[in-house]
Image (tube, rainbow, N blue to C red):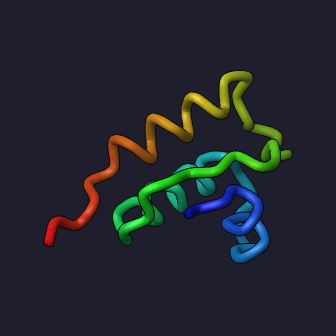
Amino acid sequence: MARISELIIGHPEIGSFAELERLVVQAAREGEIHLYMDIKPEFPDTPRKWELQLELAFYRAESPRK
């Protein structure tokens, strides 16, 4: 399970919502099957509908097929 808080804490170098979105896509492509939105990202560019945007990015990412 990919948690937003863990992605942010585990990557202190990110400083924007766009970078967080790329991490969410990467997590999906690495095999994560659930995204848990446990905190709101506090980046200046965080959109109002941030949950929907991250969810769409996660589920549209191409997960590796076995």
In front of the other: 48 or 33: 33
Residue lying at 69% horizontally and 56% vertically, measured from the top left: 4
In the picture shown, does residue 27 fall above or below 20? below
Left or right of 63: which side holds 22? right
Q: Position of residue 21 (x, y in %)?
A: 55, 50
Q: Which residue is drawn at 66% across and 32% down?
A: 50
Q: Is residue 21 left or right of residue 39?
A: left
Q: Which residue is drawn at 33% across and 41% down?
A: 60
Q: Which residue is drawn at 56% across and 40% down?
A: 54
The spot of residue 27 in percent (x, y) is 47, 65
Where residue 23 sits, quadrant-wise, is: bottom right
Residue 46 in the image, given as x and y percentages of width and height: 74, 36
Quadrant of image for the N terminus: bottom right
The front one of 13 and 57 is 57
Q: Quadrant of the C terminus?
A: bottom left
Q: Which of 2 and 42 is in front in this view?
A: 2
Outermost residue, top direction? 48
Residue at the left extreme, as displayed: 66
